[in-house]
Image (cartoon, helix red, strand yellow):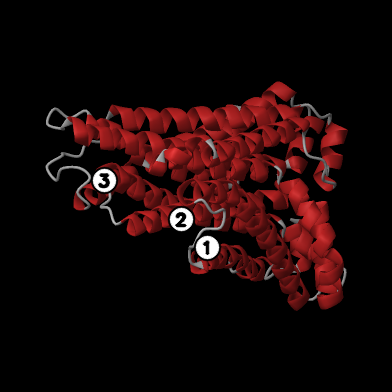
Amino acid sequence: MFRLALQSLRHRTGGFMASFIALFLGATIVMTFASMLDTSGGSSVTSADRDTLVIMANVVGGFALVIVIFAATSTLTLSVRQRGAEMAVLKHVGATPAQIGRMIVGETTIVALAGSLLAILPAMLGGWLLLEALASTGQVSATVPYRFGPIALGLGLGINLVSATVAAALTARSTTRKRASESSAAAMIETPGTGKKRVIAAVVLLAVGIGLGVVTATVSREEGYESMQTAGQASIWASIGFALLAQVLLRAIITVLGHPLAQMTGASSYLALLNLRQRSHQMASIAMPIILFTGLATGTLYMQDIENSVTSVEGVAKSTIQKNIETLNYVFVGMIVLFAAIMLINTLVAATTYRSREFGQQRLAGSTPPQMLSMVVVESIVLAVTGVLFGSIASLVSVVPFSIARTGSPVPDSPAGIYLGIVAVAVIITIVPTPTTTRRVIRTSAVEAVAA
C-alpha cells in the first residue's frame, strides 16, 4: 500500500496540492516563531530580551499552531472526501480497510514531510525578519544574534508530521468504516449531516470563548491592557467553534437567502443554491477560513485600536510590554491575513478543479458557460456572506468585553474603516479566484470532462 501511495502521489499531484500548501505554510509559521526560542537561548541574550522572545514564540506561535492544525486537518479531510469514488473502487477490488488506511496515512506522511522540509529555508528567513522587526522597534537589543536550531526544526517537523498523520488516520477511519456499496453511494450523494463530535467540540469552544469574554468584562476590568490576554483568546476559540459548524451555518444562510437570490438572478442562482445544498460539506471547507480570517482580524485590530485610544486619552507613554503586545497583535493579524488568503484561494481552486465532471454534466444538460460563471459567483457570494457574518459575530466576543473593560462602554469609539477593510479583503479573496478557475476548467469539452 505504501507503493500505491507513492503511485497515487505521482499521478494525482494536483489533488494533493491543497494539502501540501497547507502543511508547507503550517511548518513555515511554526518554525518561524519557534526560532525565537532558539534565539532566546543564546549566551549573550539578556533576561529582558529573552522574555520578549519567549513571549513572542509562545503567544503568537501557540495560537498560530492551533489555527494551522485546524486548517491542515480541514484540508486533508476535504482531499480524502473528494476521492470517495476511488476508495469505493479499491474496496470493490478487494482492498481491506487497513490497507486503505495505510495508503491514506502514507500519502499524508509523504506530503507532510516534503512540505516540512521545503519550509525550512522560508522559516529561517521569516524568523530573521521577525527578529529584525523586534530590534527595529526597540523591543530587543540590536545585538541579539539570530539562531535557527533544534527547537525550531523539532517543533516544525514533529508537530507537522504528527498533526497530519493523526488527521489522516481519523479521516481514514471514517472512510474505511463504510462498505464498498456505501462508499459508492456516498461518492455520488453527500451525507448532509454534521457529526455529533464536531457539534459537541464546536459548542465547547463557543462556550470557552463566551466565558473568556465574560471574564474580560467583569473580573479583568481593573487589569488594564492585561485584559487582552483573555479578550484575545475569546475570539480565537469562538471563531474556531463557528468554523466547525460551517456546514450548519451555510445551510441556514441558504435557507434565508435562497428565495431572494432565486428571484433576482433566476437559473444561475437556482443551480448555485442546489449545489450548495448538495455539497454543503465540501463548500463548508471554503467558509471555514473566511470565518477564521474575519473573526480573528476584526477582534485583534479593534482591541488594539481601543487600547491605543485609551493610552492616547490617558496621555501616558506605552510601556515595553504594551509595545510588545502591540507588535504581537499586528504580527498575528498579518500572519492570519496571509495564511487565510493562501488557504482560501488554495481550497477554492482545489474544490473548483475537482468539479470538472459536474460542470461537464451541467453543460450537457444545457447550461451555458455564462450561466456556469454566474452560478459559481453566486456560490462565492453566499460563502462570503456566511464567513463574514459569523466571523463578525465571533469577533464581538472579544471586542465588546474588551471595550467594556477599558472604556466602560460596549460600543468602541473606533473607525468603521477597519471593519470595512477586513470585509473587503474577505470578499475579494473569496469571489475573485473562482470565476478564473472555472473558466479554465470549462475549457475542456463537456464530453471529455464527464468521461474523465
- Identity of the amino acid at label 1? Ile
Q: Measuring 83% from the left and 44% from the top, which residue is drawn there?
A: 192
Residue 194's place in the image compared with 412, above or below, is above
Residue 329's place in the image compared with 45, above or below, is below
Mark 3 to mark 2 CA distance (whole Å): 19 Å
- Identity of the amino acid at label 2? Leu
User: In what element is the residue under mark 1?
Assistant: helix
**Which residue in the protein does label 2 denote?**
301
Mark 1 to mark 3 CA distance (whole Å): 28 Å
Quadrant holding the C terminus: bottom right
Q: Does residue 84 show up?
A: yes
User: In what element is the residue under mark 3?
Assistant: loop
Tell whether 295 sits left or right of 176: left
Answer with the quarter of the image where residue 198 lies.
Answer: top right
Place of residue 210 in the rendered image (x, y in percent of width and height, measured from the top left): 62, 39
Crowdedness near tag 2: few (<14), some (14–19) or many (≥20) residues, C-alpha within 10 Å: many
Place of residue 291 in the rendered image (x, y in percent of width and height, measured from the top left): 61, 52
Tell whether 438 sits left or right of 451: left
**Which residue in the protein does label 1 denote?**
422
Q: Measuring 54% from the left and 38% from the top, which residue is drawn there?
A: 218
Place of residue 4 in the rendered image (x, y in percent of width and height, measured from the top left): 61, 33
**Which residue in the protein does label 3 denote?**
319
Q: Measuring 63% from the left and 35% from the top, which residue is drawn there?
A: 205
